[in-house]
Amino acid sequence: MRMQLLRIGEAAERLGVSAHLLRHWEVEGVITPHRTASGARRYDPELLDALSIAIKCQQAGMSLSVIAQLLNGRRHERRRLVAKQRDVINRQRAQLERVAAFLDHVLECSHPVLRECPACQDFVSSAP
């Protein structure tokens, strides 16, 4: 059974991204599509899977260079990169939860001026 290779526009449409993005990711070393004899790019199911992973990684805040390492690296390197990004996300989540709790307090704060509120002052003077 012959594997179906998609043209760049078809791959982009299937992934919900632009063909320009796929070309850019190729230049950045994130992916390496197959090429026809005339140089046209072709995308197989394995490359589409890698691109789906790359899109999710970018949504998680990973840079293209890190995504390229993740897709092309060895298992121990992938684990290290993923653990590092997970730690970044967990720190961001903790900071967002802290800010959300502060905003909840501000909604209920009875002080006429926020500078007069001890809880508001604690938030402002705490470490970022």
Image (spheres, rainbow, N blue to C red):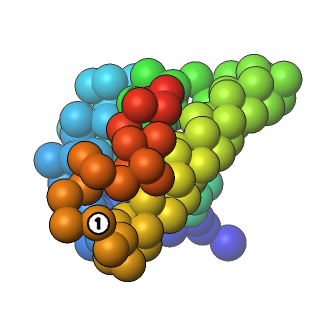
In this rendered view, identify the residue nearer to me: 118 or 99. Answer: 118
Residue 113 x/y as whole percent: 19, 58
In the rendered image, is residue 1 in sight? yes
Left or right: residue 105 versus residue 40 is right
Left or right: residue 119 versus residue 11 is right
Residue beneath disc 1: 111
CA neighbours of label 1 inside 10 A, class few (<14), some (14 to 19), many (20+)? few
The amino acid type found where label 1 is placed reads His
Of all residues, the one furthest to the bottom in this rendering is 108
Quadrant placement of the N terminus: bottom right
Residue 99 x/y as whole percent: 43, 54
Left or right: residue 26 versus residue 75 is left
Where residue 71 sits, quadrant-wise, is top right
Q: Residue at x 44, y 22 (%)?
A: 65
Q: Residue at x 25, y 55 (%)?
A: 114
The image shows residue 54, relative to residue 102, as above or below, that is above
Residue 97 x/y as whole percent: 54, 58
Residue 93 x/y as whole percent: 56, 52
In this rendered view, identify the residue nearer to me: 125 or 38. Answer: 125
The image shows residue 108, relative to residue 79, as above or below, that is below
Where residue 10 sits, quadrant-wise, is bottom left
The number of callouts visible is 1
In the rendered image, is residue 96 in sight? no
Q: Residue at x 48, y 32 (%)?
A: 126
